[in-house]
Amino acid sequence: MALANQATYFSEKEQSFDSIILYMDLDAFFASVEIRENPSLAGKPLIVGGNPKTKRGVVSTCSYEARKFGVHSGMPVSQAVKLCPHLVMVRGTYSLYTKVSNNIMGILKHYSDVMKVAGNDEAHLDLTDVVSDYEEARKLAMELKDDVYASEKLTCSVGIAPNKILAKIASETDKPDGLVVLKPLEISDFLAPLDITAIPGVGKKSKEIFIRNGVNTCGDLAKLPHQLVYQKFGKYGLKTWKLVNGYNTEKTEGKFVSRERKSISEERTFFHSYSNWKDIWVSLDSSIQTIVTKAKEKKMNFRTVTLKIRFQNFDTYTRSYSLQCYANSEKQVREVVSILLEEFSDKSPDNIRLVGVKISNMIKIDDNQKTLTQFFNKTD
Ligand code: TTP
Ligand code: MG
């Protein structure tokens, strides 16, 4: 349906874009840092995460060479090795990643006062008051990319668009080392050929529902009458429809501000050194129950689960896994913790001094609101 015919259904604000947003995401972050530190790894299919000796645990990330074999973040290491037998594994240098991340966020701050750190290797910058048009934004992005490379010898991919979600989508279409500028009038044509999963929040389950209804690409969804979209996919389906038709689905008034990232965590120390895996799990289970209950009380869903483990010699490890969709159950956390814990299965539980669990990357769900994912889960 032509955009003009829909216009009466949506407010002026939804059709107007008055911001220029830049999104930056580092390429294969942990793997790129490892390659920088040890150039002999360059060009090899590399994974970071898990235990190289036991081939257990979960892939934190992998080089683009490993991705060609189908390996990806969150995959069990055992499966990754099956897909790519000559895979090179490194455990990861997590303190270094934090240092690099802080340094890069410090560089980005120089480009705009209005910045939102979205993860360890990603951030949004509001350039609305910094540049006068998209061409100037492109030049600024090229400078930013050069700056990041000069400082940390790492490449990043950048998207520039009239809102945060579109800037992120744009950046993901030209990885690694990309720069994509998406202007307001180009949005629907740009999105049309992209797979529907290019929209953040549309994961495997939602995709299945879309495919069952004949929607493979963003363009397929855009063409459907909006009433049918609402009927079949609910409120968030309609929001996605607006996005792929070039409407502004984000609030435009005011500039976004750096928000403190919300998380809920609990950790417990063992003051004796005779614990076994059963004790460890009793402690983890109890922490999981506490944090998920708190999240439910706050009406928050989450995407990232982090396991923290400290040994008697004070060696401390944190391992994170981001789910494809927002979650809200103890079961989901337990499953992730269980796979993250596998990395340490060759260690003696006697030596564990502390275990903790954190959930982060949270969004508020109000009573009347369902995420697209929840909607699909219910209809499945
Ligand atoms: P991403 O930006 O999602 O991935 P990436 O930078 O490795 O690759 P891409 O080029 O596609 O952006 O995540 C940033 C880092 O966060 C990643 O290098 C490792 C870590 N991470 C985890 O530890 N667990 C996870 O589940 C994911 C998705 C990422
Ligand atoms: Mg990245």
Image: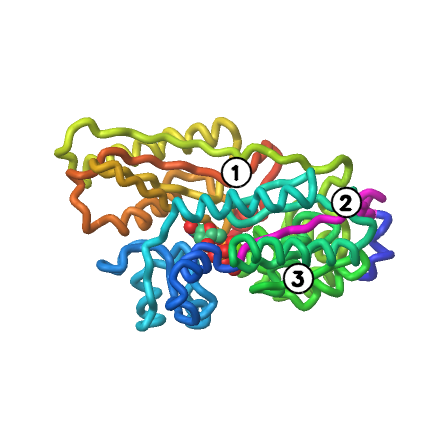
| Residue visible at 56% across and 64% down in the picture | 176
Q: What percent of the width, then of the height, locates residue 291?
A: 40, 31
Residue 33 sits in quarter: bottom left
Near mark 1 (Cα within 10 A), the count class, few <14, some 14-19 or many ≥20, is many
Residue at image position (67%, 56%) is 143
Query: Extreme front residue here?
Result: 150
User: Label 1's element?
Assistant: strand
Quadrant position of the N terminus in the picture:
bottom right
Residue 104 is situated, as x and y percent measured from the top left of the image, at 55, 47
Residue placed under numbered mark 3 in the picture: 179
State which region is magenta: 9-26
The image's mark for residue 130 is 2
Please state which of residues 95 and 81 is positioned toward the viewer in this rendering: 95
* Residue occupied by mark 1: 362
Q: Are marks 2 and 3 in contact (CB under 8 Å)?
A: no
Out of 227 and 196, give the one closest to the viewer: 196
State the residue in front, 287 or 164: 164
Circle 2 sits in a helix, a strand or a loop, which is it? loop
Whole-percent x and y of residue 129? 78, 42
Is residue 301 at all visible to an observer of this figure?
yes
Q: Is residue 323 left or right of residue 376?
A: left
Within 10 Å of disc 3 (Cα), the crowding (few <14, some 14-19, many 20+) is: many
SS for callout 3: strand
Q: Is residue 153 left or right of residue 112?
A: left
Amino acid residing under circle 1: Met
Of the residues tagged 2 and 3, which is closer to the observer? Answer: 2
The residue closer to the viewer here, 353 or 229, is 353
CA neighbours of label 2 inside 10 A, class few (<14), some (14 to 19), many (20+): some
